[in-house]
Amino acid sequence: MLSSFLFRIKDHRRKQGRRYELGHVLFFSILAILSGADSYRKVQKFIVNH
């Protein structure tokens, strides 16, 4: 349910910035924050590890 909502959010990034789908970026960012990540670097580290 959450993922279906996240994939309906309009992506305003330029074509150059769309390496990954926005839904995936948002979903993994939420998971990282719930796991205790409190900075961009910690979010990135969480995503790489998982």
Image: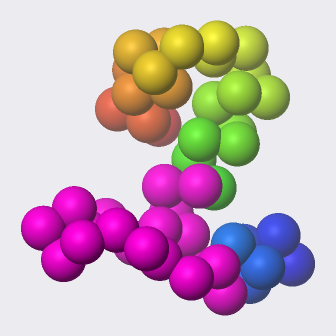
Query: Looking at the rendering, which quadrant does residue 4 occupy?
Result: bottom right
The residue lying furthest to the right in this view is 1
**Residue 40: x %, y % from top left:** 46, 21
User: Position of 35 compared to 2: left or right?
Assistant: left
User: Position of 50 compared to 18: left or right?
Assistant: right
Identify the residue shown where x is 69% and y is 39%: 31
**Residue 25: x %, y % from top left:** 48, 55
Query: Looking at the rendering, which quadrant does residue 21 occupy?
Result: bottom left
Identify the residue shown where x is 24% and y is 72%: 14
State the predominant SS element of the stretch in magenta.
Answer: loop
Residue 20 shown in magenta: yes
Judge whether 42 appears above or below 3 on screen.
above
Judge whether 48 appears above or below 1 on screen.
above
Identify the residue shown where x is 12% and y is 67%: 16
Q: Nearer the viewer, residue 15 or 27?
A: 15
Magenta range? 7-26
User: Position of 4 compared to 22: left or right?
Assistant: right
Mark yes or no: residue 34 visible: yes
Identify the residue shown where x is 44% and y is 35%: 47
Residue 44 shown in magenta: no
Q: Which quarter of the rendering shows the N terminus? A: bottom right
